[in-house]
Image (spheres, rainbow, N blue to C red):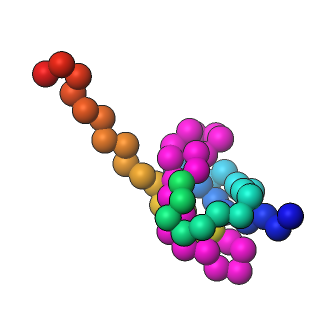
Amino acid sequence: MPTLTGACPECETDLTTPPLNEGETLSCPECLLTLRVDGIQDGTLSLQMIEVQLRDWGQ
Ligand SMILES: [Zn+2]
């Protein structure tokens, strides 16, 4: 099965993933950030960090 590669924009860990589509998300196994596939070119993922918006609880 073909795989895609990319690098985490935060910790620069090399990632190998199963085929993904643009707009899908994955978690970096190293820093656990959620990353979104911004684009795919020649089997290389362009990843963008998603800012997790924390809500105030009970306020
Ligand atoms: Zn990372």
Give coordinates of residue 51: x percent, y percent: 37, 48
Position above or below: 29 against 56: below
The residue lying at 25 percent from left, 32 percent from top is: 55
Q: In the rendered image of this protein, does residue 31 appear above or below residue 44?
A: above
> On the picture, is 55 further left or further right than 49?
left
In this image, 58 relative to 31: left or right? left
Q: Is residue 57 above or below residue 28?
A: above
Quadrant of residue 53 within the rendered picture: top left
Judging depth in this view, the residue of 18 and 34 nearest the camera is 18
Identified at 56% across, 39% down, the residue is 32
Q: Which residues are magenta?
A: 26-44
Q: Residue furthest bottom?
A: 42
In the picture as drawn, the residue positioned furthest to the right comes out as: 1
At a point 65% along the width and 41% down the height, the residue shown is 29
Q: Find residue 48 and report its horizontal and vertical position in percent.
A: 48, 60
Whether residue 5 is visible: no
Image vertical order of residue 35 relative to residue 55, above or below: below
Task: Tell me the quarter of the picture where residue 43 sits.
Answer: bottom right
Q: Quadrant of the C terminus?
A: top left
Q: Please state the horizontal and vertical placement of residue 57, each as a whole percent of the image.
A: 23, 22
Q: Quadrant of the N terminus?
A: bottom right
Residue closest to the far left:
59
Q: Quadrant of residue 2?
A: bottom right
Q: Does residue 28 belong to the magenta stretch?
A: yes
